[in-house]
Amino acid sequence: MRDPKETDPAHPPEATLDPADWDAFRALAHRMVDDTVEYLATLRERAPWQPMPPTVRDGFDEPLPRVGEGEAAAYEQFRARVQPYPNGNLHPRFWGWVQGNGTPLGMMADMLAAAMNPHLAGFNQAPARVEHQVIRWLAQLMGFPADAGGVLVTGGTMANLLGLNVARHARAGWDVRKLGMEGGPRLTVYGASETHGWIRKAVELMGMGHRSYRPVAVDEAYRIDLDALAAAVREDRAAGHRPLCVIGTAGTVNTGATDDLAALADFCAAEGLWFHVDGAFGAWAYTSDALRPMVAGMERADSLGFDLHKWGYLPFECACVLVRDPALHRAAFASAAPYLAVSERGVTAGGLPFADRGVDLTRGFKALKVWMSFKAHGVDALVRLVEQNVAQARYLAARVEASPSLELVAPVPLNVVCFRYAPADLPEAARNAVNEEILLRLQEGGIAVPSGTTLGGRFAIRCAIVNHRSRRADFDALVEAVERIGREVVEGR
């Protein structure tokens, strides 16, 4: 007998976003997976980047869709208008900025995580145990204590911001959570002038302002000048300010330089300062026996931020902050609310530990792709890839040095190569413009995607190599293309 509510105007049929036809959706889902696997398997056959045609670009100005067109139609729109026009970071010849490439397994792990859709504030559930285990593994890899505080976050900016906030809570000298910045003198934070731009955002968001950040000069290798650092701390104390934290960098974005982390650890211990390391990509050098000496001292940091979507090779977005003292970590963020009360049994048993380690309450299941990647590939495979990227950077540097028309613009200590087209007969005054044009033609021509930077007034083509798909032949092709395009640009001037 028909339920009278089905035809009762006062009780219309209840809606859902589940498919009306699960078999049809299953077929579409299989097609999505098959198409995507084919897309990844044929990456090398396509250009790293191509501009969107005006018709595609203008198509995103369409009105708000009030009535849906169905899953299959929406997917076709994705295939035609979105998938062909990324910035190229999956491609073997993408070396722009420091952007990871992801992996097919990581893609599927994200799908599985999204299908489960767990809320990772904590709770009594297996996904929380996965994240706890991942944090322990990462602490072990980075030389931190097994019980270090840690949480997975979106990226290096957030990881570093959380570490700096713990530093302020631990070393300000007053209850910052209660009094804010009104509780004492101006707090000051120090880092090399090459420190990533996250620090300025962080001091702004924390209400400390630009004045609280003290950029310190670097030496000829782009590492923080320790004498200049000591002088800055002395001057601030003499002025009545309170030095709080020193930021050491493991792998700068510009050149891949690493500060003398052991010396910074000694300095912070002697001066009573918090030692934070921004290891966005360079922290992974610690996992390699061969590369670990380059970041020696990192394991002595009070807090460490690093990404897993760079040299961990995972899909965006996934990063981690580790804090040596887990009690300080929790004390900097934990809060209570009656609607989040913890019980000894049931779903809330075990509490909401991850919500107490950062600013997010609602969190996705980032840990699954880390867990599955480590289990499927093994950490040793990831370490070999890190070493491979460093070897590729040294290979590219050697090719540049062997070319009569190219020159290195900075040392190559790790995995970033900055070079330019600079034949002897090209005047210095013209070199910046010529190299900027070379860079754009490399990108627009679908040859490769390096990025650019300026060092000492010299514009450089910059390759940040965190790509597990790159091969030496790709770097050979890059060098040959830069030499060829350079000649064409100069002849056309």
Image (cartoon, helix red, strand yellow):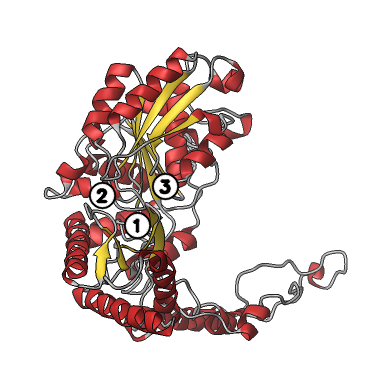
Amino acid type at image mark 1 = Lys
Residue 227: x %, y % from top left: 29, 27
Total number of numbered labels?
Answer: 3
Residue contact at pointers 3 and 1, CB within 8 angstroms: no
What amino acid is found at the position of numbered circle 3 in the picture?
Gly
Confirm whether residue 32 shows in the render.
yes
- At horizontal 63% and vertical 77% (from top left) the residue drawn is 20
First in residue order: circle 1 vs circle 2: 2
Label ID, residue 310: 1
In space, the residues marked 1 and 2 are separated at their CA atoms by 9 Å
Residue at (46%, 50%) from the top-left corner?
154
Q: Is residue 380 above or below residue 446?
A: above
The residues tagged by marks 2 and 3 sit, at their Cα atoms, a distance apart of: 13 Å
Query: In the figure, is residue 22 to the left or right of 388?
Result: right
Left or right: where 40 falls relative to 140:
right
Is the Cβ of the residue at disc 1 closer than 8 Å to that at disc 2? yes
Q: Is residue 206 left or right of residue 33?
A: right
Q: Residue at x 42, y 76 (%)?
A: 443
Which residue in the rendered view is the most extreme toward the left? Answer: 290
Q: Residue 284, which numbered label?
A: 2
Q: Residues within 10 Å of mark 3 (few under 14, many from 20)?
A: many
Where is mark 3, residue-wise?
156
Between discs 2 and 3, the one toward the N terminus: 3
Query: First in sequence: mark 3 or mark 1?
Result: 3
